[in-house]
Amino acid sequence: MSLPDSAPPPARRPQVALLTREFPPEVYGGAGVHVEHLAVALTHHVDVAVHCFGQPRSSPLVAGAYRPWDALEGDAPPLSALRTVSVDLRMAAAAEDADLVHSHTWYTNLAGHFAKLLHGIPHVVTSHSLEPLRPWKREQLGGGYDVAAFCERTAVEAADAVVAVSAGMRADMLACYPAVDPDRVEVIHNGVDADAYRPHPGTDALLRHGIDADRPCVVFVGRVTRQKGLPYLLDAAEHLDRDVQLVLCAGEPDTPQIAAEVRDHVERLRGGRHGIVWIEQMLDRADVVQILSHASVFVCPSVYEPFGLVNLEAMACEAPVVATATGGVPEIVVDGETGRLVPFEPSSTSDGGPADRGRFALDLAAAIRDVLSDPARAAAMGRAGRQRVLERFTWGTVAVRTAALYRRLLAG
């Protein structure tokens, strides 16, 4: 049946190219989790084409996966940065059919910028962290750190819109890049899959990893990096009761130096207490959910956390959270209601650590002990945390706000 002459033609759905380093099955950080879930949620509003690094993917959402130029093979950190740029060039060329391009992290920011110039389309940047606030990355990347900073600055200053994942991140963005128009920076919080991350009663994963389900359990989940602050949690552990287990789901060290530092500290702790479980391999999500569900307290000792997605994952599993009051974390964790916030004053050194490491360790330990001291109150904090997730931090909400931003840009 033909439509009446007065009926407007169906509106064409915008074609959006999402540019990302990570996409399943290769996801190792918060930015990768973000893109994984945002891509699916956005399909209710726009047509999504994901462009990512690495091997071809089976997902129908993936339009292309790209490898760096063969001529740039090698282990030197500067070559790693140049390999990223070579992938960006391929991504930019492949986005020719998009109405809008949306890049995530410095790894793809330059691709988004070049796509904007090549194809005359709007470029949205989601900023998951800021290179000027991660000076310890120079330890890992050498001169590649300056390449990363160049890619980020170039894209952010020219982008049609910048998404900050927290109000704290927005403030940092405008401080780091004063050339950016504040009206172009919009706060859209991350989300969490509350169906995947929910309390799980099982204990089989705990048994496999040597965790005693009947003992109090302090849990850390994160990479072994300066940013995630694991050494400071190890400092704090020296001030915890010896009956408390410390479970470290921690791998992928940035450098041999921090790997050795953490290993030495763990061995010193093991010399004076039992119940330190260090799981160094990447865990399946099901195992992480089970461990979080049985955590007496989840600890996020990060020195820099623009958002802190891992806190949402813990809260969704009804774990009370003790976290550093840095970046976007105070927008997630409500002190005294869903956990405890620990004050943090950064030092002026390149490692970004606390100005007073001893004081920070004592404050962190005190907050952990406070939560452990009252299991009934801790359980109430956990329930309040999940309720906060359900009310404020779903991927459906993130997608609605992101799609509205796309429509404003495309409307001109």
Image (cartoon, rainbow, N blue to C red):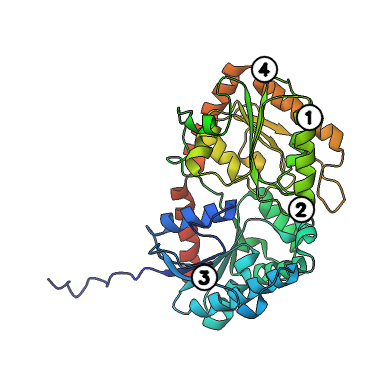
Looking at the image, is mark 2 or mark 4 nearer the viewer?
2
Residue 223 spot, x, y in % from top left: 66, 47
Kind of residue indicated by mark 4: Ser
Of the numbered discs 3 and 4, the one sitting upstream in the chain is: 3
Of the numbered discs 2 and 1, the one sitting upstream in the chain is: 2
* Cα gap from disc 2 to disc 4, whole angstroms: 37 Å
What residue is rendered at 66% in x and 67% in y?
A: 156
* Cα gap from disc 4 to disc 1, whole angstroms: 15 Å
Most foreground residue, 303 or 211: 211
The kind of secondary structure element at disc 3 is strand
**Residue neighbourhood size for the residue with mark 1, other residues' Cα within 10 Å, grouped as few (<14), some (14–19), many (≥20):** some
Kind of residue indicated by mark 2: Pro
> Total number of numbered labels?
4
Q: Which mark is residue 373?
A: 4
The kind of secondary structure element at disc 2 is helix
Kind of residue indicated by mark 1: Asp
Most foreground residue, 228 or 110: 228
**Residue neighbourhood size for the residue with mark 4, other residues' Cα within 10 Å, grouped as few (<14), some (14–19), many (≥20):** few
Looking at the image, is mark 3 or mark 1 nearer the viewer?
1
* Cα gap from disc 2 to disc 3, whole angstroms: 37 Å
Does residue 235 appear to the left or right of 288 in the view shown?
A: right
Q: Which residue is mark 1?
A: 363
